[in-house]
Amino acid sequence: MQLELDPSIFIFPNQTHSNNVKIINKSKSYSDTDAIITTSPDFGLGILIADCIPVFLYNINTNHFALVHSGWRGAANKITSITLKKMIEIGNNPRNIKAVVGPSIGKCCFEIGEEVSGLFDSKHLLSKGQSKYYLDIKQSIHEELISIGLNKKYIFIDSNCTSCEENKFFSYRREGKSSGRMMAIMGWENK
């Protein structure tokens, strides 16, 4: 399948692992931003990822959509909830929002220390011993989506692990600073 998307319409924010969310209303630079929302089919949204979670949000009635870049900092600071609340403020009923939690590092590989583990509910942690844990960040975000009011049948969680599956994905955890990046994009296909 080939998509007919005009690359000039895509907005890529300057991601900083923040919980800052912006509503796109014109084509410009969006600094210190990790989630973007648009109410117009004139724009496409994009983020770069390499283990962090891309969260795609789409309202089936208003056609508003959002793209969230959520690493552990964003997840701990509830960037997905902040994005959904902004969508609700501009007229989106959460029961009509579909969500895709895209490929990212899985609980099998997402090792964290005690300083990060304290930011998450213990039910999303598996002890590895000696103050080390594995974090199920996808499940944490799934619960966040439910708590805001999304319908479970409208939530899809991708099970791929970017760290394990080196033939498919780049991984910052696996490759370090030299890791490549994957692009998550969302937009309307030109017909």
Image (cartoon, grey):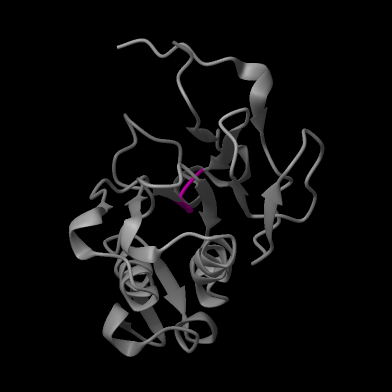
Quadrant of the rendered image containing residue 33: bottom right
Where does residue 124 sit, x and y in percent of width and height? 30, 79
Give the vertical position of 87 relative to 15 (above or below).
below
Residues in magenta? 50-54
> Residue 9 vs residue 166: left or right?
right
Residue 53 is one of the magenta-drawn residues: yes
Q: Where is residue 8 in the image (x, y as percent from the top left)?
A: 68, 18
- What residue do we see at 64% from left, 67% from top? 19
Does the rendering let one see residue 188? Answer: yes
Q: In which quarter of the image is residue 131?
A: bottom left
Quarter of the view holding residue 144 = bottom left
| Left or right, residue 108 beside residue 12 | left
4, 31: nearer the viewer: 4
Residue 125 % position (x, y): 31, 80
Residue at 62% of width from left, 27% of height from top? 42
Q: In the drawing, does residue 191 fall left or right of residue 27?
A: left
